[in-house]
Image (tube, rainbow, N blue to C red):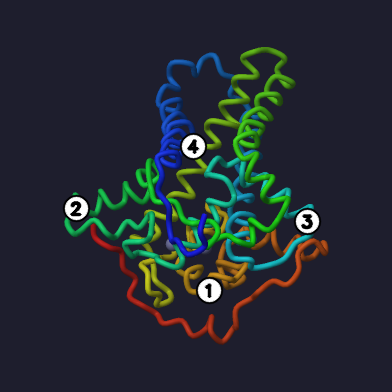
Amino acid sequence: MEAGRFVVETPQIQRLQRRHFILFNVLPLLLIIATPLYWDWLYHGGFEIALFATMWLLTSLGITVGFHRLFTHRSFQVAPSVQIALAVLGSMAAQGGITSWVAIHRLHHEKSDTESDLHSPNLHGEGFANRLRGLLHSHVLWMRRHPYPNVVRFAPDLLRSRHLRSINRNYLNIVWIGLLLPTAAGFAYHGDLSGALSGLFWGGVLRLFVLEHIIWSINSFLHVFGNRTYETRDSSRNVGVLGLITLGESWHNNHHRFANSPSFGLKWHNLDPGYWLIKGLEALGLATDLRMPDPAQVEARRALPSTSAHL
Ligand SMILES: [Zn+2]
Ligand SMILES: [Zn+2]
């Protein structure tokens, strides 16, 4: 791929995008909708809830701390072993290989809410129907088929890392392992096929579904609804109350203003579990060089009216 090209589109890439969309976006949705058909066969007790919560938390941290704050924005440094762990956990979230995830997100920051942004909700015109179309596009539909950012231009640092190249190449295998692990745990706990299927459902299918909609909501709803603490050239917004469930990602306006900060909440009282993990790693000597923003700039917030775009 030539470094000068911005995006590429080939029939082969489009086939891969379509296959990925059907496997990891459409199929989990259909399986969730069909839950009443097989709900009675599944175990659903404390073990299943714990399995779901554990797999969701680990893979979500892989996305926000690994794919996003470490690999896309390089907001801190870690030892190679921690890099590998975060890259593998993020890959299990089935949101694309690490190289394309990083390239697409760097493109988002460079071109937020312009025609080159692959998932802006704000380019479909005014009026209820158009705003809704924009939200649907940015939430999920853009993934069916889209121009692919040139990874040589957007992610050369990842291409230089042997470990990350290998993890990227084995992306699909890692996704399958992420589904196999809870299946094996369910079988080990209950000792029967129903236990295995329950493990696959709670720690695999439901976990994927919940995680992906939370992450996609950052792309869609948080470029439309919420507060704009800082003036940015995009429409990013904060919804602090979602800080816990998004592991800090819902401070999206803060993030667009201080993209290289490991902290998205920016203030100690703003819920940001992703940052708490980074501080924990720092305390253990496993994370260094946290690129904290200048406190004076953080304070120089321009209070904008608390607005939400109208649907
Ligand atoms: Zn954004
Ligand atoms: Zn970002």
- Residue underneath mark 4: 209
Residue lying furthest right in this view?
Answer: 285
> Is 305 left, or right, of 289 in this rendering?
left
Answer whether residue 239 is visible to the viewer in this image.
Answer: no
Is 187 on the left-hand or right-hand side of 98?
right
Residue 231 position within the rendered picture, expressed as x and y whole percent measured from the top left: 39, 77
Numbered tag placed on residue 80 in the rendering: 3
Q: Which mark is residue 278?
A: none
Q: Distance between the residues labelled 1 and 4?
A: 29 Å
State the image coordinates of residue 210 (x, y, percent, origin top left): 50, 40
x and y, in percent, of residue 101 in the image: 53, 52
Label 1 belongs to which residue? Answer: 258
Q: Looking at the picture, does residue 267 appear above or below residue 104?
A: below
Distance of mark 4 from mark 3, alpha carbons?
A: 30 Å
Q: Is residue 280 positioned above or below 298 on the image?
A: above
Give the number of the disc on residue 128. 2
